[in-house]
Image: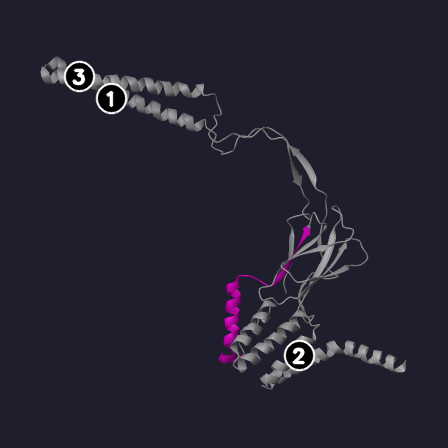
Amino acid sequence: MRALFASWIIVSGFSLASPAWAQDRLAQAEEAYLEVDFPRARELAQQALSEGGHEPGDVARMYRLMGIAAAADGDEEAARDAFARMIALGSPEDGADLSPRLRQPLLEARGEWAARNGAFEVDGRRLRQSRGVGLQLQDPLGMAARVVAFVRVRGAAAFERVELEAQDELAVPVTGLTAEAAVEYHVEVLDQHGNHLLELGSEIDPESFEGQAAVADVVAPSRPSARGEWRLAPVWLTVPAGLTLVSAALLTWSTVDVLESHDAYLASPTLDGYYAGLDLQTRTNVLIVTTSVLGAASVAWALLLTDWSGGEAADAVAFVVPTLAPGEVGLVSGGRF
């Protein structure tokens, strides 16, 4: 019994001391880096990362040390990968204090990250039908292993912990959530070792979505016009169109009359025939102008009376348009480190 109790004390003490040891290991890694012992700095940083339980800022420091140490060892691929993970965690490190050889992989990683046109982040939205919270994870480097969501109906005493395998789209159920109730939540994104990579909200300051049931508004719209449908009766268009046709017919007759008069004058040139031809030509010119004006007026009148809205003809029937509260669908909250 004493041996069992002693074993429990040892295991408990180890569990409580583990985070502190990891912090000490990170400090040792940074000390080795300052002493220009790059292999040891890399090894200690990897050990600290494997022990887990670190916050995003500390994880970024570990990846920085691993990137610098890998660059010093000539392992540029590993250096770029470590630097890319550091950048994904939001580190503003630009390597200004590094030598060109150590800085080059960092600059390349930052350029590659910028070219991705993405971010390492998690967003939340309310799911209307399943009565829960939807999470969208963007993880270009595949760093996340688990997503832990803490959810509750507003007013509940405690959050409910839901742990899920990391995926692009996640649905988190919320016990007791109704359409009218507000939901509160916060999210932690963890790597395979249990290190915190991303946090959205917190227990003290959680994210939330208001709730409200869908309200059905009955709308009975008037029949929309089909493309090219006349607003006024077609008779209003027949007046200018008819005048245009009459004027065109007179113009045709007058033109033929002018040609015949011209042929007669050429056959027997006289002064009376000459002036008669001029009168006919004047009449024809007047009819040309009149026909042109009436034609233009008809076209303008047709354009003015035509509905060009492009709507399709539809029966005048009532339809239901659901009006949803802002918290139901469409609102998204996001977080990145």
Measured in 3D between alpha carbons, the distance from the residue under mark 3 to the one under mark 1, in whole angstroms, is 16 Å
Residue 104: within the magenta? Answer: yes
Q: Label 1: state its secondary structure.
A: helix
Mark 3 residue type: Glu
Q: Which residues are magenta?
A: 98-126
Q: Label 2: state its secondary structure.
A: helix
In the figure, residue 335 lies in which quadrant? bottom right
- Nearer-N-terminus badge (3/1): 3
In the figure, residue 60 lies in which quadrant? bottom right
Q: Label 3: state its secondary structure.
A: helix
- Dot 2 surroundings within 10 Å: few (below 14), some, or many (20 or more)? some
Query: Going by the picture, which residue comes out furthest to the right?
Result: 1
Q: Residue at x 40, y 18 (%)?
A: 239
Mark 2 residue type: Gln
Q: Which residue is mark 3?
A: 260
Question: Disc 2 or disc 1, which is closer to the eye?
Answer: 2
Q: Which residue is mark 1?
A: 285
Q: Position of residue 1 (x, y in %)?
A: 90, 80
Q: Position of residue 18 (x, y in %)?
A: 74, 77
- Nearer-N-terminus badge (2/3): 2
Measured in 3D between alpha carbons, the distance from the residue under mark 2 to the one under mark 3, in whole angstroms, is 111 Å
Q: Taking 329 as reference, is 309 left or right?
A: left
Mark 1 residue type: Asn
Figure check: 23 above or below 191: below
